[in-house]
């Protein structure tokens, strides 16, 4: 027979100081949440198909070699042969990466005789790519300072 541990199971909440609202179950101060913002977050969290789709996009973007292809396509439409030559990789390797990017809606393709040309699917992909690269460049210069994280609002320790 297994014994049930009561350790930590029944914690009593310490009463909050009179000048501060009680913390909610998740540890945040009750007064810090904007109700409209929470309902927007709840709407997003309630759309599992959209979250799954976004996760698949980030998976496709999460490979350095596929990102390199997207960066090359940011400059405009490119023939697969041109991409193979620039990257110095096998045709089949580049084609497989492009196929995955296409299946996730990040690139589009156009056939011209025996040649396939690829381009970024739309402006959203270009913006997403540019934001990711810009953010990575900022992070490379060092971690953000704590005061940069609070959007100019004063943060209190207690």
Image (tube, grey):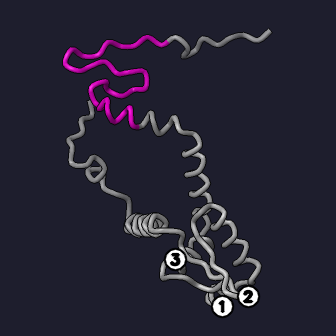
Report the disc number at residue 114: 2
Residue under the point 75% across and 84% down: 90
* Corner quadrant of residue 130: bottom left
Instruction: Provide the secondary structure element on which disc 1 rests.
Output: helix
Q: Which mark is residue 71?
A: 3
Q: Nearer the viewer's eye, disc 2 or disc 1?
A: 2
Magenta highlight range: 11-40
Quadrant in which the N terminus appears: top right
Q: Is residue 59 above or below residue 39?
A: below
Main SS, magenta residues: loop
Along the viewing direction, whichever of 20 and 82 lies nearer the viewer: 82
Is residue 33 at all visible to an observer of this figure?
no
Question: Badge 2 local density, few (<14 within 10 Å), some, or many (20+)?
Answer: few
Q: Earlier in the sequence, mark 2 or mark 1?
A: 1
| Front of the two marks 3 and 2 | 2
Considering only order in the chain, which callout, 2 or 3, is on the residue closer to the N terminus? Answer: 3
> What residue lies at 30% left-to-right and 55% top-to-bottom?
145
Q: Nearer the viewer, residue 14 or 53?
A: 53
Magenta-drawn stretch contains 19: yes
Q: Secondary structure at mark 2?
A: loop
């Amino acid at each position: 027979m297994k014994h049930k541990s009561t350790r930590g199971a029944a914690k009593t909440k310490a009463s909050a100081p009179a000048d501060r609202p009680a913390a909610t179950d998740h540890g945040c101060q009750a007064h810090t949440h904007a109700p409209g913002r929470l309902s927007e977050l709840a709407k997003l969290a309630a759309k599992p198909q959209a979250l799954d789709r976004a996760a698949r996009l980030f998976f496709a973007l999460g490979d350095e070699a596929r990102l390199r292809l997207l960066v090359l396509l940011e400059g405009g439409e490119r023939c697969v042969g041109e991409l193979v030559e620039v990257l110095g990789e096998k045709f089949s390797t580049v084609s497989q990466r492009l196929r995955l990017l296409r299946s996730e809606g990040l690139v589009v393709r156009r056939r011209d005789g025996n040649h396939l040309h690829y381009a970024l699917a739309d402006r959203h992909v270009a913006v997403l790519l540019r934001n990711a690269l810009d953010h990575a460049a900022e992070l490379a210069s060092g971690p953000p300072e704590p005061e940069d994280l609070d959007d100019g609002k004063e943060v209190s320790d207690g």
